[in-house]
Image: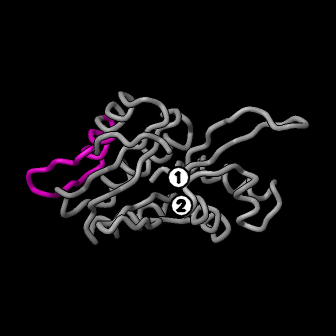
């Protein structure tokens, strides 16, 4: 599993994060913070001090971050949301749906929830990864009761969305590559 960094805690004296400009400043701070971490790291985004975030700020901050993670700009670095109240989660949910993106939210009990959009087959694959924590594409194909190509397509989609970590682990007998997929939470 990727190493967890200390959380990036969003500080605001009023408890309110508002505006695209503020979101851009926070995104730049967060990107700099994440880039100081080793590759194969996951950074919790801590919203304990935030009571409200508007759509513009959430879009500029979270959606652009997820798009950069998906593009590979941050290497093998990942993130998830924690300590977000109902209002903040609802705003994230709305903006992620508008952008056809998804993020993971870890609640106070440690349960993982998906915010945003994930099609059912991709969600099924994510649920298996979250429950098993780590495995090969072959092991996940067996757990999903799908052929290896279908399982690999789903796992690769999750990796490109920044929801799971993919690690190469050499070759397999007869040729080909072997990958492990790991939960980021």
Q: Count all numbered tags in the image, as a single digit.
A: 2
Left-right relation of 184 to 122: left
Residue sitting at x 71%, y 65%: 143
Which one is in front, 70 or 37? 37
Give residue 140's position: percent from left, percent from top. Answer: 70, 58
User: Dot 1 lies on which element?
Assistant: strand
Residue sitting at x 56%, y 49%: 182
- Are there few (<14), some (14-19), or many (20+) residues within 10 Å of tag 1? many
Residue sitting at x 42%, y 44%: 65
Determine whether 161 is above or below 31 in the image.
below
User: Dot 2 lies on which element?
Assistant: helix
Residue 129 lies in magenta, yes or no?
no
Residue for badge 1: 183
Q: Which residues are magenta?
A: 8-28
Determine whether 28 is above or below 44 in the image.
above
Give residue 8's position: percent from left, percent from top. Answer: 27, 43
Residue 105 found in image quarter: bottom left
Residue sitting at x 44%, y 59%: 104
- Are there few (<14), some (14-19), or many (20+) residues within 10 Å of tag 2? some
Left-right relation of 117 to 106: right
Which one is in front, 56 or 82? 82
Determine whether 69 is above or below 164 in the image.
above
Residue for badge 2: 130
- Between the C-alphas of marks 2 and 1, the distance is 5 Å
């Amino acid at each position: 599993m990727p190493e967890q960094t200390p959380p990036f805690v969003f500080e605001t004296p009023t408890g309110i994060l508002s505006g695209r400009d503020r979101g851009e400043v926070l995104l730049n701070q967060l990107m700099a913070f994440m880039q100081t971490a080793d590759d194969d790291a996951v950074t919790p985004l801590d919203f304990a001090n935030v009571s409200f975030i508007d759509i513009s700020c959430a879009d500029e901050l979270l959606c652009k971050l997820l798009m950069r993670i998906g593009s590979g700009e941050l290497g093998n670095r990942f993130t998830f949301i924690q300590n977000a109240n109902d209002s903040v989660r609802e705003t994230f949910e709305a903006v992620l749906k508008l952008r056809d993106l998804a993020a993971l939210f870890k609640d106070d009990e440690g349960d993982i929830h998906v915010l945003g959009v994930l099609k059912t087959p991709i969600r099924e694959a994510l649920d298996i990864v979250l429950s098993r924590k780590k495995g090969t594409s072959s092991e996940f194909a067996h757990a999903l009761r799908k052929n290896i190509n279908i399982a690999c397509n789903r796992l690769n989609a999750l990796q490109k969305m920044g929801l799971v970590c993919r690690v190469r682990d050499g070759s397999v007998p007869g040729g080909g590559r072997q990958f492990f997929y790991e939960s980021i939470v």
